[in-house]
Amino acid sequence: MMIKLKIIVFLMLFALSNHLTAQSAISHEIGVIAGPLEFRSDYGQRNSNSNNEKNTGYGIGFVDYLTFSYRTNFGTYFSEHFRVRNELSYGKTELKHYGKWVENSHTSIGYIQLRAMYGSTEIINLGTQLEFNPLQIHRYERSYSVFAPYISIGAQIGYYTAKASSKLGELGTPVTTHPKYLVPSDGHPNGFSNESKAVLSAVASIGTRYKLNTMSDLLLDLRWQYYNSDWVDGLNPNRDLFKENKYNDSMVWLSLGYIYYLEH
């Protein structure tokens, strides 16, 4: 049901974008964004800020905004308060276990195996968000050195490549692998996987623009992205046996950006 809902939202937003682009009041704004991202995964201690901070990667993206107030003088509520944001982005994170389960004071084989485990995930995302601006877009565009906060929701489709490894050797044997990851899980022979697959995600953002001049803005954006899979990081312990594995993978991305107006 969740997958179907995300697909419907994704298609509706793209349909809205394509429909409105055909109208004469559409203008484009293009930009680039980049910044650190925290990948919330099955690596390390769950709900640990220290673990999340250490499992930080980077992301970069290209954005195209559709603004509907072009050639109108304070038009409809929708055209003055909403934008559609299309985006293509790339992110990569190196992953390790951090927290109380890998403290150096422990010398049992399980702790050694967890400390030796490492991995990475790379993902390309393509998607659309509907952005709401409390301030009128026209009023903001005619001002200088002002902030324009916003919130947005949307959906994306991605393609990830996950890798899981160990300093002890190839994963998959009792010598190199913690027992938690040797149990079959979600159609896989183990609780880890090296794979490349498509994935859907829901996206929510909060941020602000800052008006630099007539034709450009700075952007600060904080995003939460929730995937419909728990394999994006390459780990997914069997949920029936390991109850702490409650959630799919997710990501928090703080990015800075530069936006340029193609029309004004």
Image (cartoon, grey):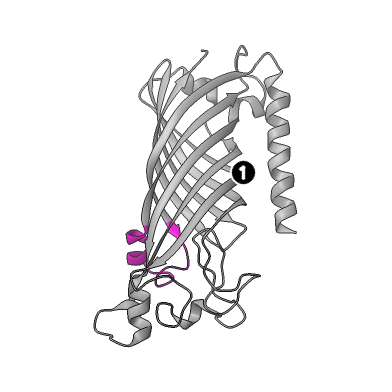
Who's the residue at 42% across and 15% down the image? 214
Let me know if residue 234 is in the magenta part.
no
Q: Is 156 in front, or is 231?
A: 231
Which residue is painted at 61% across and 43% down in the image? 154
Q: How many marks?
A: 1
Q: From the viewer's perspective, is 52 left or right of 263?
A: left
Residue 149 shows in this picture: yes
The x, y position of residue 79, in whole percent, is 64, 25
Q: Is residue 161 above or below residue 34?
A: below
Residue position for label 1: 154
At x 47%, y 42%, the residue is: 90
Secondary structure under the numbered disc 1 in the rendered image: strand
Where residue 132 sits in the image (x, y, percent)?
58, 36
Residue 104 picture quarter: bottom left
Asked whether, in this view, residue 202 is left or right of residue 115, the answer is right
Left of 109 or right of it: where is 126?
right
Comparing 20 with 178, the one in front is 178
Picture layout, residue 231 above or below residue 90: below
Q: Which contiguous range is marked in magenta?
A: 39-55
Say if residue 133 shows up in the picture. no
